[in-house]
Image (cartoon, rainbow, N blue to C red):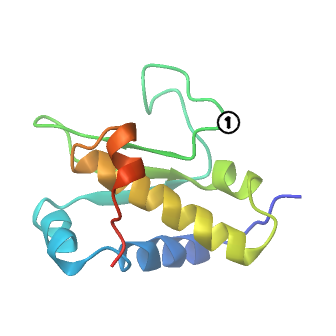
Amino acid sequence: MPFHVSVDEFERIAAAALDTIPESLRARLDDDNLLITIQSAATESDREEDIDEHVLGFYEGGDDFPKRIVLLQRHIERWCSTHAELVDQVTDTVLHEVAHYFGMDHNDIGETRLRH
């Protein structure tokens, strides 16, 4: 059974996940005004391709668009049955998307530790 929290609690969990990133990398995120957006689920307007229920978040942005990480709250909650699992999954998703922000592909992400 999915574990649900309020949007405010989810935002607190996401902010705490960012705090696990070393300060030197967090400063780069702040300098670029990277946004973290919480959505209950994916919408077609977010991306051109379809986003299935297994996608927990994504990074988008570029020269012409604001850089942002979108966390799909209901998608993440679907995989969690306790608060601890939710915290772990949000943290993993934030770190995964931050790695994409820094230009890492999926192979690089598996080999890199972003937590301090």
Total marks in image: 1
Residue 37 screen position, x and y as percent = 42, 56
Identified by mark 1, the residue type is Glu
Residue that carries the numbered disc 1 in the rendered image: 53
Q: State the residue in front, 36 or 79.
A: 79
- Residue drawn at (70%, 69%), measured in percent from left and top? 85
Residue 38 screen position, x and y as percent = 50, 57
Mark 1 residue crowding within 10 angstroms, few (<14) / some (14–19) / many (20+): few
- Residue drawn at (53%, 75%), measured in percent from left and top? 13
Residue 56 screen position, x and y as percent = 57, 46
Secondary structure under the numbered disc 1 in the rendered image? loop
Image height of 113 relative to 72, above or below: below
- Residue drawn at (74%, 53%), measured in percent from left and top? 79
Residue 67 lies left or right of residue 88; in this view the side is: left
Residue 101 screen position, x and y as percent = 26, 49
Q: Where does the N terminus fall, quadrant-wise?
A: bottom right
